[in-house]
């Protein structure tokens, strides 16, 4: 063999090895925090179809350049509107320019009109006439906008006052807020204005906070720190007073409901009668154990009737307004947990129960729409599994329930105007996102999107789920176990428990990757076992499962988490001497409590925005689950983690946001003082300028900080 041949052979060998090494490096590439955390520069998430909506019974898809109509029978697509056409009309009226069409909303199916929103502008474009049909130019500072398409009325707030069509509705002094969400967004409240069906009347909240103690938050970005106080009623203290007004745009006048003294009552779940002559709301006493569905006159504000009353020795928690049947204006659906799970009950307007529409050891999660022609209700529920959310139609006449989806995973549906079709967006542990058009009468399915795996090409951990028994020895609890991709069953792995554990949250589902968080996946790539358990007290398992924690938050939940650790220690690959815990908000309380109550189990903890002393928490949430400090002093004392500060043995990092107006910084700072007094030594990190969580680009920094703490000490 000559030298040239040998040289070629060596070169080929080297190139083959380089190719193999490059291939291996590609195969072994692991995701970064930027890949996994929202706000990361390379954040990966499943593909989606932005702006999917219904225009009558026509499905609408929006993108950058076009608005497309989809025939739900055939799947055939046709272009309705282009960005160029809208921008030409906007330019002609000197109203600005759209960079994409993702946020446009089609209005009545009887009109070829679309709502276009630009900063401070609500514009209706008529694409058949190719002109601007109407516009609302809002003043600087306008917020809480509420546009009613049929009447073309626009409500909004500036500072603490309410306006409609640029006319002031209220003129209130400092300390009184109108047209905004009240009761700290509890009881399903998310807004402060409610248009009547025809848009000729506007119900709105008026909240007097002037008697509520202010909590001092400080803006450190100013040259000299500036005080940003917030009205924050703590458990057992004086709360705000709320009433409901009704504004008539035609007369420019308002009336207020005559509900008597609104002290120590909550007004929730506002809905209008179909004829717009009266409206309904649920009044809840401050003890939150007695709810009343009340009907008020829209003309006089007088109480017309109390239709339903509901009591419970622990608490009643109304979350949904009543819904009238579109084919019978004298009948409505009332949602309640009275039988242990959230179910639907059919009533008439005299307050007489006609019949329960659903029952069983599962719950209705939401009502998606109606099919008036078939007298059907379309819902999502947990009937298939507590880990799932599936779509059903319910025949009101005979009660028959018919599944509408494939019976797997977590489904979110949007019903068309007639209820003959649904846009079904769903995921399973192995499917990141599929979107289907489903015909509700024959089940015909048209696929709109099959999302690719966003982590294709990366080495990802494996995920398992299962059940263990709760500390009561009988209740099944669902867990999720995340293992490294290069998992070695013969090796002892450090393990981190990610915990939330509180009401209205479920950490383990049958959706994409069983709802594993990006940070869980990241830590598994670094060799950790990641474990999450939905203890008693968490969501979607019924009232008894949730309210077992009543008057002693964190106690039963902690016992269940210890059962989870016992299960972990039974696994030969878990290092029982290296178990950590992390959580935020209620999970921050749980993390701190577990570190203090079980110092022999948990060696390292990172608690974010923790509730330390429930006496410092707000009235609505705190008193629902704990009663008041005056009526439950033993519970508040037992659950006050400052009293346990001396039991800290492991490494505990507390992270808090300096503008946290949900779980105020006093929790963390008072705990630090208690630890100093007890001669224990937690660590502290503050995120300036953030509220109850760290958002945006700083969120990657947050998770790097958490990671480093576990890397240093676990």
Image: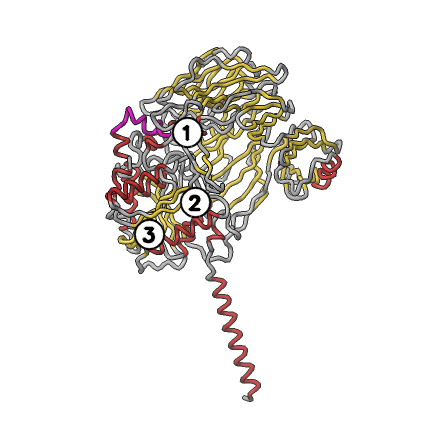
Which residues make up the magenta segment?
A: 620-633
Q: In this rendering, which labeled residue sits more in front, label 2 or label 3?
A: 2
Q: Which mark is residue 495?
A: 3
Please name the residue that numbered disc 2 is placed on: 687
- Secondary structure of residue under mark 1: strand
The reply, left or right, for residue 497 in relation to residue 407 is left
Where on the picture, by quarter, is residue 308? top left
Q: Residue 157 at x, y = what percent?
A: 56, 27
Q: Magenta segment: does it hold 589?
A: no
Residue at left offset 47%, top offset 33%: 380
> Compared to 313, does 546 lie above or below?
below
The answer to whether residue 90 of the structure is visible from this angle is: yes
Q: Earlier in the sequence, mark 2 or mark 3?
A: 3
Q: Which mark is residue 214?
A: 1
**Viewer-closest of 258 and 227:** 227
Q: Magenta segment: does it hold 629?
A: yes
């Amino acid at each position: 063999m000559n030298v040239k041949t040998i040289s070629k052979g060596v070169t080929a060998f080297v190139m083959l090895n380089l190719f193999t090494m490059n291939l291996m490096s590609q195969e072994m590439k692991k995701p970064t925090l930027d890949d996994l955390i929202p706000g990361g520069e390379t954040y990966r998430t499943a593909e989606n179809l932005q702006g999917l909506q219904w225009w009558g019974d026509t499905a609408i898809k929006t993108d950058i350049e076009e608005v497309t109509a989809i025939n739900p029978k055939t799947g055939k697509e046709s272009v309705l509107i282009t960005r160029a056409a809208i921008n030409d009309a906007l330019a002609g009226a000197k109203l600005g320019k759209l960079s994409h069409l993702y946020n446009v909303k089609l209005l009545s199916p009887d009109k070829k009109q679309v709502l276009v929103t630009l900063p401070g502008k609500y514009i209706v474009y008529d694409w058949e006439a190719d002109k601007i049909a109407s516009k609302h130019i809002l003043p600087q500072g306008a917020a809480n906008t509420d546009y009613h398409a049929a009447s073309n009325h626009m409500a909004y707030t500036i500072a603490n006052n309410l306006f409609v069509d640029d006319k002031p509705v209220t003129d209130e002094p400092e300390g009184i807020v109108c047209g905004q969400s009240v009761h700290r967004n509890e009881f399903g409240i998310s807004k402060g204005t409610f248009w009547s069906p025809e848009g000729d009347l506007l119900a709105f909240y008026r909240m007097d906070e002037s008697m509520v103690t202010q909590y001092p938050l400080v803006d450190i970005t100013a040259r000299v720190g500036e005080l940003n106080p917030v009205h924050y009623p703590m458990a057992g203290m004086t709360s705000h007073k709320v009433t409901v007004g009704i504004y008539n745009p035609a007369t420019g006048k308002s009336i207020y409901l005559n509900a008597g003294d609104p002290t120590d009552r909550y007004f929730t779940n506002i809905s209008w009668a179909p004829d717009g002559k009266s409206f309904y709301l649920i009044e809840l006493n401050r003890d939150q154990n007695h709810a009343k569905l009340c009907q008020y006159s829209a003309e006089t504000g007088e109480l017309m009737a109390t239709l339903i009353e509901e009591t419970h020795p622990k608490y009643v928690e109304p979350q949904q307004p009543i819904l009238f049947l579109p084919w019978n204006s004298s009948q409505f659906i009332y949602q309640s947990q009275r039988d242990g799970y959230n179910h639907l009950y059919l009533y008439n307007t005299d307050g007489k129960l006609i019949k329960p529409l659903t029952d069983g050891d599962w719950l209705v999660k939401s009502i998606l729409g109606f099919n008036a022609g078939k007298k059907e209700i379309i819902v999502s529920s947990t009937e298939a599994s507590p880990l799932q959310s599936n779509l059903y139609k319910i025949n009101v006449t005979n009660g028959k329930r018919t599944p509408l989806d494939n019976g797997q995973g977590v489904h979110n549906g949007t019903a068309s105007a007639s209820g003959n079709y649904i846009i079904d967006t769903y995921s399973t542990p192995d499917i990141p996102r599929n979107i289907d058009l489903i015909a509700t009468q024959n089940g015909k399915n048209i696929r709109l999107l099959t999302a690719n795996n966003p982590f294709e090409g990366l080495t990802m951990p494996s995920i398992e789920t299962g059940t263990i028994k709760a500390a009561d020895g009988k209740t099944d609890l669902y867990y999720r176990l995340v293992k490294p991709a290069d998992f070695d069953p013969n090796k002892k792995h450090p393990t981190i428990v990610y915990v939330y554990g509180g009401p209205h949250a479920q950490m383990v589902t049958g959706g994409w990757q069983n709802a594993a968080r990006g940070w869980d996946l990241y830590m598994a790539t670094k060799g950790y076992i990641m474990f999450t358990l939905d203890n008693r007290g968490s969501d979607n398992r019924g009232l008894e499962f949730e309210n077992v924690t009543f008057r002693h938050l964190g106690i039963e939940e902690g016992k269940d988490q210890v059962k989870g650790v016992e299960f972990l220690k039974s696994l030969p690959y878990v290092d029982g001497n290296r178990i950590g815990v992390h959580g935020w908000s209620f999970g921050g309380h749980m993390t701190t409590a577990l570190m203090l109550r079980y110092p022999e189990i948990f060696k390292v903890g990172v608690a974010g925005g923790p509730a330390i002393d429930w006496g410092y928490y707000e009235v609505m949430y705190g008193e629902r689950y704990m009663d008041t400090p005056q009526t439950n002093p033993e519970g508040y004392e037992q659950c006050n983690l400052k009293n346990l500060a001396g039991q800290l043995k492991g490494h505990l990092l507390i992270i808090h946001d300096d503008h946290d107006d949900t779980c105020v910084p006093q929790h963390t700072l008072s705990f630090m003082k208690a630890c100093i007094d007890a001669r224990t030594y937690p660590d502290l990190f503050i995120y300036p300028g953030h509220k109850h969580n760290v958002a945006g680009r700083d969120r990657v920094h947050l998770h790097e900080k958490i990671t480093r703490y576990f890397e240093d000490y676990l």
